[in-house]
């Protein structure tokens, strides 16, 4: 007797992700159910929702799936190239929407949470440490995000002048430094604090204020604001 392959149509109608999305909105669905809509069908012994939950468990959530990337994802049972492509495309759409939201002139950064919400989706998944500089106008509105350094960051390896180079070109009023810790722990190192202190001092000379230095960890809301902790400021 052949074991049944589960399809979304086989789930009770009031439990089907697509129908629930239509009736109550995407926000009411779990992450496993959202993945199930992309997967469409399950495998022998697992519904699409069960496969979605297995992927979340295997990679440690959506952020882990994003970080694993296409090659790792397509190797998972019940996924393959086509479904991996669909999942990664959906994740990229989410990342672009997050960037687009803050690329509009009417949006401004008013708190460390605003900065973290803008940068965390993308930077938390990076495998190496990266430093980016956010340029702001006089009303703290986004002008540009400048990627600068990849690799271990400290005040000796980072040229302080590079932090302000594009800000001077764009006539930015202020900047925010953002970098990630691939370990997932956003606690600042002594090097992070020294870099912040050097940048703040240089900014005073250039009349370009360093508003904050945000360290991105893994997991929603997992970040550190050095300005809030008064480290280097």
Image (cartoon, rainbow, N blue to C red):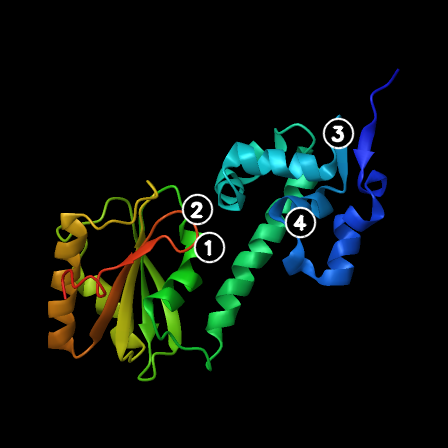
Q: Position of residue 197 (x, y in %)?
A: 12, 62
Residue drawn at (32%, 40%) of the image: 183
Are the residues at dot 3 and dot 2 in contact (C-beta closer than 8 Å)? Answer: no
Badge count: 4
Are the residues at dot 1 and dot 4 in contact (C-beta closer than 8 Å)? Answer: no
Question: Which comes sooner in the sequence, label 3 or label 2?
Answer: 3
List the residue tagged with mark 1: 121
Cα distance between the residues tagged 1 and 4: 17 Å
- Quadrant where the image shows the N terminus: top right
Residue 22 or residue 118, whichever sits in front: 22
Q: Residues within 10 Å of mark 2 (few under 14, many from 20)?
A: many
Are the residues at dot 4 and dot 3 in contact (C-beta closer than 8 Å)? Answer: no
Residue extending farthest top: 1
Query: Relative to 99, is 43 on the left or the right?
Result: right
**Above or below 127: residue 20:** below
**Above or below 86: residue 167:** below
List the residue tagged with mark 4: 34
Q: Position of residue 106 (x, y in %)?
A: 47, 82
Cα distance between the residues tagged 1 and 3: 30 Å
* Disc assigned to residue 43: 3
Cα distance between the residues tagged 2 and 4: 20 Å
Q: Residues within 10 Å of mark 1 (few under 14, many from 20)?
A: many
Residue 98 or residue 166, whichever sits in front: 98
Is disc 1 placed on a helix, strand or loop?
helix
Residue drawn at (15%, 49%) of the image: 191
């Amino acid at each position: 007797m052949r074991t049944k392959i589960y399809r979304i149509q086989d789930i009770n109608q009031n439990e089907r992700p697509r129908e629930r999305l239509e009736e109550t909105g995407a926000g009411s669905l779990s992450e496993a159910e959202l993945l199930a809509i992309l997967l469409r069908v399950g495998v022998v012994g697992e519904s699409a929702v069960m496969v979605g939950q297995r992927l979340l468990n295997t990679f440690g959530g959506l952020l882990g799936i994003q970080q694993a990337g296409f090659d790792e994802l397509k190797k998972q049972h019940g996924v393959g190239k086509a479904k991996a492509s669909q999942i990664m495309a959906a994740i990229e759409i989410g990342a672009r929407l997050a960037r687009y939201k803050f690329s509009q002139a009417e949006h401004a950064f008013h708190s460390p949470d605003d900065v973290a919400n803008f940068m965390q989706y993308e930077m938390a998944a990076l495998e190496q440490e990266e430093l980016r500089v956010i340029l702001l106008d006089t009303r703290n509105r986004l002008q540009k995000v400048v990627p600068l350094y990849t690799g271990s960051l400290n005040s000796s390896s980072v040229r302080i002048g590079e932090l302000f180079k594009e800000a001077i070109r764009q006539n930015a009023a202020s900047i925010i430094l953002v970098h990630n810790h691939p370990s997932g722990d956003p606690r600042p190192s002594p090097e992070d604090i020294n870099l912040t202190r050097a940048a703040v001092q240089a900014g005073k000379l250039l009349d370009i204020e360093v508003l904050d230095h945000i360290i991105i960890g893994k997991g929603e809301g997992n970040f550190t604001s050095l300005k809030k902790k008064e480290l280097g400021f």
